Amino acid sequence: MTPPRPPRYLTLLLGALAALPPLAIDMSLPAQGTIAEALGVAEPRMGLTLSLFMLGFAFAQLVAGPFSDRFGRRPVLLAGTGLFAVAGLGCAMAASLPGLLVLRAIQGAGAGAAVVMVFASVRDLFDGPEVRMRLSSVAMVLSIAPVVAPAIGAQVLAGFGWRAVFGVLALAGGTLCTAVALGFRESHSRRDPTALEPARLVENHLRWFRHRTSPIFALINAFCFGGLFSWIAASPLVLMGSYGVSGTVYGGLFAVTAAGIMLGSGANRILAGRGVPGSAALRVGLLMSATASCGVLLLSLAGLPPLWLLMPLLVLNCASMGLVSSNATAAALQPFATMAGVASALGGSAQMLGGALAGGISTALVGVAGLTGLGAMMAALSLTAVGMRALAMRRMRV
């Protein structure tokens, strides 16, 4: 059975769904200090809200992937967006840090269930180079979120307080749930009735882990995303703490760095349309990431650099993800047309676990060593990703 013809608005809808995690993370960043004061905790501990969100995100994908291979993508999308909305309302009413952490983990689970369906749906409907192009298009829509989210969060915070930030997130989740209910046609035409049987689950997972290159490409994406998320998690401490900028200025500076993702995704779509191999674009992206991350480390070793020197390196690092993420994800998913849900879940979980761990470690390092701690974390992760690509290329030649 041939999958239904994708409607013209599908890319916009999938991009909006994929934007749930950066929207939930980046809108709350300007409010971290205010929330810490309101709940009576030290500001560095607020980094746990990001890490718990990412852990919930990662775990939910492992559950949602097999369920979608069995029952389809649409039911999981509805459940994920609905859970995101309800958890957002809970976060808006949280009275303590432990309660907020639990609700952020639940909110992350809702976002994870939705996002894994985005990549699985792209794999359902497209093949070959078209997967790269569609993922790049989704990434371009997705990249709008980190550009505008901090500014929106800062304005909502200034006008209505930190609880309203989570109220807006709940509204976004409810709107997307309605959009899926009204406008998303099921993309999975080859459902596996045995997908949830224990033996089948083990077989599918082992098939992915035993593949020669797919797990390596997923790890490349995870290490690079870890470097990016190190900056995301530590950015309030660096910009508002070390540099002393206001929440409004912070939102603007963060938007500038996040715009790099849009530039990288746009460049990747152009390269894919012109027939440039994904492996070449991935190599360029990894070199950009390593150059930018090592540059941040070297600058910080000489003291706190001026923002006009630091910002271009951070923009370059973000732009590298526009090249790395789409191509690494496409390479990891390509061999698994019949189990795209499981493959997308495993790769996505690796990415989010990498982000969660990197975010928690980077905020701790910044608390101890300032910008140097962030630069060291970013450099270590980007150089590891470069080494992983070398391993993948060697395995493909054997």
Image (cartoon, rainbow, N blue to C red):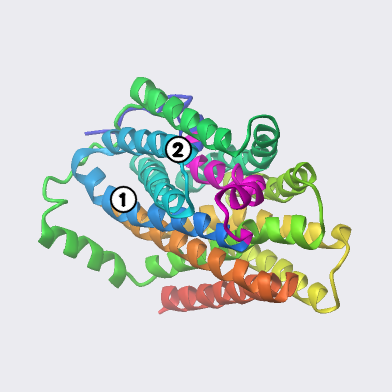
At 47% from the left edge and 32% from the top edge, which residue is drawn? 170
The answer, for residue 270, to whether it is visible in the render is: no
29 inside magenta stretch: yes
At 63% from the left edge and 56% from the top edge, which residue is drawn? 232
* Callout in the foreground (2, 1): 2
Q: Which stretch did the figure color magenta?
A: 16-43
Q: Mark 2 points at which residue?
A: 88
Apparent side of residue 354 relative to residue 121 in the rendered image (left or right): right
Q: Position of residue 372 (x, y in %)?
A: 73, 74
Q: Closest to the observer: 319 or 101?
A: 101
Q: Closest to the observer: 70 or 278?
A: 70
Q: Position of residue 228 (x, y in %)?
A: 61, 60
Q: Is mark 2 on a helix, strand or loop?
A: helix
Mark 2 nearby-residue class (10 Å; few <14, some 14–19, many ≥20): many
Image quadrant containing the N terminus = top left
Of the numbered discs in the image, which one, if any, rests on residue 340? 1
Name which residue type carries label 2. Answer: Gly
At 49% from the left edge and 62% from the top edge, which residue is drawn? 356
C-beta proximity under 8 Å, tags 2 and 1: no
Q: What element carries label 1?
A: helix
Q: Where is residue 60 in the image (x, y as percent from the top left)?
A: 33, 51
Disc tally is 2
At 39% from the left edge and 54% from the top edge, which residue is drawn? 56
Q: Distance between the residues labelled 2 and 1?
A: 29 Å
Q: Closest to the observer: 297 or 217?
A: 297
201 inside magenta stretch: no
